[in-house]
Amino acid sequence: MLDITKVNIEKAAKIIKSAKHVTAFTGAGISVESGIPPFRGDGGIWGKYDPKILDLPYFLANPLDSWIVIKEIFYEFFGKAKPNNAHKMLAEMESLGWLKAIITQNIDNLHQEAGSKNVIEFHGNSKILVCTNCGNKELINKINLGKLPPKCEKCKSLLKPDFIFFGEGIPQNAYQQSQSEVKNADVFILVGTSGSVIPASYLPFEAKKNGATIIEINPEKTNYTDEITDVFIRAKAGEISQQFIEALNTKNND
């Protein structure tokens, strides 16, 4: 019987090895294998918690209420997560020269912890706090979350996690860097993203319009699969990571 997953991995590896500029685009699904649930859908965070805690006006008006839940979700629960084989696969691809950059919608810092160097954080990073008044930034591991809400060391104003809340725009640098990748990439690898979060979800479509070949690694079909995906590897990225790296390192794929 034909192993379609193996065939598509080898096809994807061949495309990547003949490419000039490969960019990865990751979403919540890549971190599910690290024990971090997605925000939406079955078993999602917003099924248990009220998303208003990340609504910027609500947060500013009710910082203590918001911070109690933020601490529980992002620093007690998510904070224990470690990079999985999918994160490590992308880091290895970068170190071997196959991958130029990762655009991630995730805020968990797991790509960096896995060893990836060029990570564009489209939605920010939970490991950093930013002052709502003076803009001073602090690493979360330097902050005592035993006393909530945390305050800025410089001006004593309210600190918030340095990721995008509802009502905030995409960070300018991240947006510009992402647009550069969309223009330069001749291969775009989608990992663990369903294409449901706007405006991040537009990036693969823009890359496709610019001529990029779309490789998708997801356990189920997504908003991209039938629209723009050229090679669909139907699997969890962590489970095929070793096979993927081996295919890239096999000479007969050239």
Image (cartoon, grey):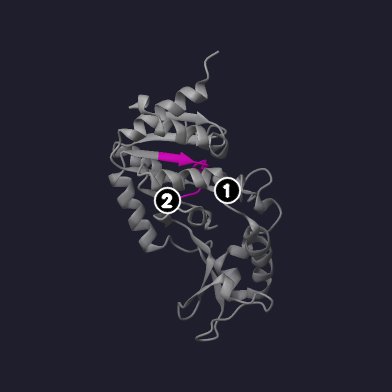
The majority secondary structure of the magenta stretch comes to loop
Give the percent coordinates (x, y) of residue 213: 35, 34
Q: Is residue 109 above or below residue 24?
A: below
Give the percent coordinates (x, y) of residue 249: 40, 33
Q: Residue at x 66, y 77 (%)?
A: 148
- Given residues 71 and 14, the one toward you in this image is 14
Q: Quadrant of the C terminus?
A: top left
Q: Is residue 44 left or right of residue 130?
A: right
- Given residues 223 and 9, the one toward you in this image is 9
Residue 103, labelled with which disc?
2
- Secondary element at image label 1: helix
- Secondary element at image label 2: strand
Based on the displayed image, in which of its 4 quarters is residue 85 positioned? Answer: top right
Based on the displayed image, in which of its 4 quarters is residue 10 positioned? Answer: top left
Q: Which numbered disc, 2 or 1, marks the residue that appears first in the sequence?
A: 1
Given the current orientation, which residue lies at the most extreme top position?
1
Does the image show residue 30?
yes
The residue stretch that appears in magenta: 189-200
Residue 31, labelled with which disc?
1
- Given residues 197 and 207, the one toward you in this image is 207
Does the image show residue 228?
no
Q: Residue at x 52, y 41 (%)?
A: 194
Q: Is residue 190 left or right of residue 145?
A: left
Which amino acid type is shown beneath numbered disc 2?
Ile
